[in-house]
Image (cartoon, rainbow, N blue to C red):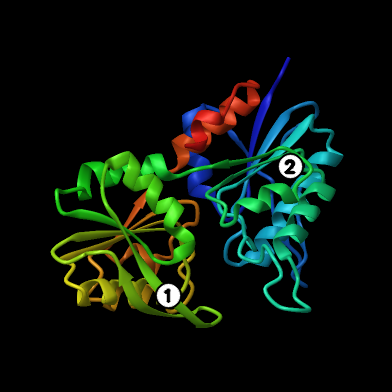
């Protein structure tokens, strides 16, 4: 008889608890501890022999600790004779290092894929992976679930108006914005961005007419918010009346939260719970968090029952 087991790492405990409630399956505690020298140890509190195990862990800040936690939990489950081990990674860390951008640089997204596979992962479920080619880095099944249904529902009910326009913060995000615009029958615009260094961007031009419009910027992640703040300023300078920002992954590295809080050009930021907010982030009223628990629960349930998850990809 098939048996499902849910295991939560330390990075996504609240999201894991919500998924547990949706599926009506209790979470198994991996009993993670750290030795005095920083080494990570775990011991599953319950028998997982022959079970289909889903390990919920975003590889977010602290990224390296989160990755090691995940690998160690997967190894422990493999050695405990789990029938299958699915890594549910709401945010896939190192996803921006998906290709060589200059000589003598790594492709770290591929390295993480190799580590997960070698550790014993039999399937990966993630959400809005930064680069689609990462799916090809794995020789095991890989499901990339989109958060767009959750974000789109919020936009439709709370933000959309006759003056709305979707905006891509750079050329690479145009396809994502076009998907939203097509579904909600809204025009699109684009920011022409120049990057002068790592995590440093300067918005230069706005492609499209945003004068008198309520702009909705759509991106996959917000890191230091430098690009976002520059984009908001450019849109307001070109006559936008309001600027909202939507992103799946709230990485919010310093000084992102202070930039968001202090920006007079940015009216609201909508993100999901793939990465938990810090206490400071929770205190910023213009940040709205949407839950992906139901979407991920459906993906886990369908995977366990060998049903199709293709409807969750759009």
Quarter of the image with the N terminus in it:
top right
Residue 57 % position (x, y): 61, 50
The mark nearer the N terminus, 1 or 2, is 2
Residue 192 in the figure: left or right of residue 109: left
Within-10-Å neighbours for mark 1: few <14, some 14–19, many 20+: some
Q: Is residue 138 something that shows in the picture?
A: yes
- Secondary structure of the residue carrying tag 2 is loop
Q: Is label 1 in contact with label 2 (beta carbons under 8 Å)?
A: no
Badge 2: how crowded within 10 Å, few (<14), some, or many (20+)? some
- The tally of labels here is 2
Q: As drawn, which residue projects farthest toward the bottom?
A: 196
Residue under the point 49% across and 43% down: 146
Q: CA distance from mark 1 to mark 2?
A: 47 Å
Q: Which residue is mark 2?
A: 44
**Nearer-the-camera pick, 29 or 128:** 128
Question: Which residue is painted at 21% across and 64% down in the image?
Answer: 210
Which residue is rendered at x = 21% and y = 73% of the image?
236
Q: Nearer the viewer, mark 1 or mark 2?
A: 1
Q: Is residue 220 visible?
A: no
173 up-or-down from 234: above or below: above
Judge left or right: residue 208 versus residue 226: left
Rendering coords of residue 279 (x, y %): 40, 65
Where does the image place residue 173, in percent across and percent down from the top left? 45, 59
Residue identified by numbered label 1: 193
Q: Is residue 86 above or below residue 190?
A: above
Image position of 133 (left or right of 196): right
Quadrant assignment, res 271: bottom left
SS type, badge 1 = strand
Identify the residue shown where x is 69% and y is 53%.
Answer: 32
Q: x, y percentage for residue 294?
A: 45, 35
């Amino acid at each position: 008889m098939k048996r499902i087991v849910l295991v939560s790492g330390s990075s996504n405990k609240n999201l894991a608890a919500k998924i547990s409630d949706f599926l009506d399956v209790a979470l198994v505690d991996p009993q993670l501890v750290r030795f005095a020298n920083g080494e990570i140890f775990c011991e599953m509190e319950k028998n997982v022999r022959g079970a289909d195990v889903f390990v919920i862990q975003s590889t977010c800040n602290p990224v390296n600790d989160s990755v090691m936690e995940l690998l160690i939990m997967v190894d422990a489950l493999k050695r405990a004779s789990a029938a299958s081990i699915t890594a549910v990674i709401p945010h896939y860390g190192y996803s921006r290092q998906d290709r060589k951008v200059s000589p003598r640089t790594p492709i770290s997204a591929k390295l993480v894929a190799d580590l997960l596979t070698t550790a014993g992962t039999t399937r990966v479920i993630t959400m809005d992976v930064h680069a689609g080619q990462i799916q090809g880095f794995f020789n095991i099944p890989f499901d990339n679930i989109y958060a767009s249904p959750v974000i789109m529902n919020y936009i439709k009910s709370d933000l959309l108006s006759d003056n709305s326009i979707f905006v891509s913060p750079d050329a690479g995000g145009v396809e994502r914005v076009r998907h939203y615009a097509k579904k909600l029958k809204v025009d699109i615009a684009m920011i022409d961005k120049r990057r002068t260094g790592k995590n440093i961007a300067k918005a230069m031009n706005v492609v499209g007419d945003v004068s008198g419009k309520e702009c909705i910027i759509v991106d996959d992640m917000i890191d230091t918010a430098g690009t976002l703040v520059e984009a908001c300023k450019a849109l307001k300078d070109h006559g936008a009346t309001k600027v909202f920002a939507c992103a799946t992954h709230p990485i919010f590295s310093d000084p992102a939260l202070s930039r968001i809080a202090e920006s007079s050009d940015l009216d609201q930021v909508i993100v999901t719970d793939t990465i938990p907010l810090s206490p400071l982030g929770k205190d910023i009223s213009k940040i709205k968090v949407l839950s992906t628990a139901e979407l991920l629960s459906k993906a886990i349930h369908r995977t366990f029952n060998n049903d199709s998850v293709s409807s969750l990809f759009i």
